Amino acid sequence: MVADLADLPAKVGKPILAAWNVKEDLRDLLDLHGANPTREQIGKLLIWFYENAAAFGLPEMERPANTVSTWWPQILAGISTGITNAVSEGVNRLIKTDARCAFGYRNPATQRLRARCATTRRARGHLTTRTSGPCSTQSFDQARLSSQRRFKQYSEERPVLRGEAGPV
């Protein structure tokens, strides 16, 4: 990829390559998460990221640096401790996606129920569902049709009770 970008005109290839390098510097910094890094390691990579982001002076590289600067205490805590709120953020994303698909909810009880259903492990595909057997869609449809046939047969065979109209 570096060679391909070097072959492009300098006006196009150099900024793209610089942006890619800044992205990789940020990834190197964030890859320290959970590795018990020292403050020196974190500081070295952070300075490297800021210097590379400022080198070209492009807004596309300054914005990530400003965002990292704004959120640095939280980022540092995540890198140092290895603790994140990724699970809760993921659940919130699932709930918001479900709300968009539902075009809103009728009432808060429905919202709670739909949110719980959307965030279960089975709904997210972590547990396999049966494709055959008593719980499969085909078996369910067959059972429903069988039940409808039995009900129809029962209603035709049952005797008419007093005060009840006959079959229509």
Image (tube, helix red, strand yellow):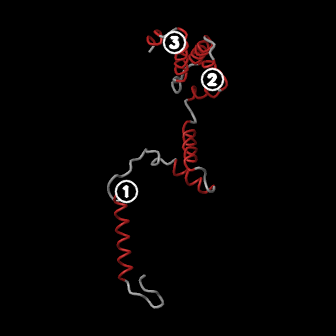
Decide: is 138 above or below 50: below
Give whichever of 17, 45 is nearer the camera.
17
| Viewer-proximal residue among 66 and 103 | 103
Coordinates of residue 80 in the picture (x, y in percent):
58, 26
The residue shown at (59%, 56%) is 110
Circles 3 and 2 in contact, beta carbons < 8 Å: no
Label 3 – label 2 distance at C-alpha: 25 Å
Left/right of residue 111 with respect to residue 153 in the rendered view: right
Residue bearing the label numbered 2: 68
**Mark 1 neighbour density, 10 Å: few (under 14) some (14–19) many (20 or more):** few
- Pointer 3: what residue? 13
Q: Quadrant of the N terminus?
A: top left
Q: Amino acid at mark 1?
A: Thr
- Residue 82 place in picture, x, y as percent: 55, 30
- Classify 37 as above or below 113: above
Residue 57 left/right relative to 134: right
Q: Secondary structure at mark 2?
A: helix
Comes first in the chain, label 1 or label 3: 3
Q: Which residue is mark 1?
A: 137
Looking at the image, which is closer to me, 47 or 117?
A: 117
- Neighbours of disc 3 within 10 Å: few (<14), some (14-19), many (20+): some
Extreme residue toward the right, this view: 70
Q: Quadrant of the C terminus?
A: bottom left
Q: Nearer the viewer, mark 2 or mark 1?
A: 1
Crowding at dot 2, Cα within 10 Å, few <14 / some 14-19 / many 20+, comes out as: some
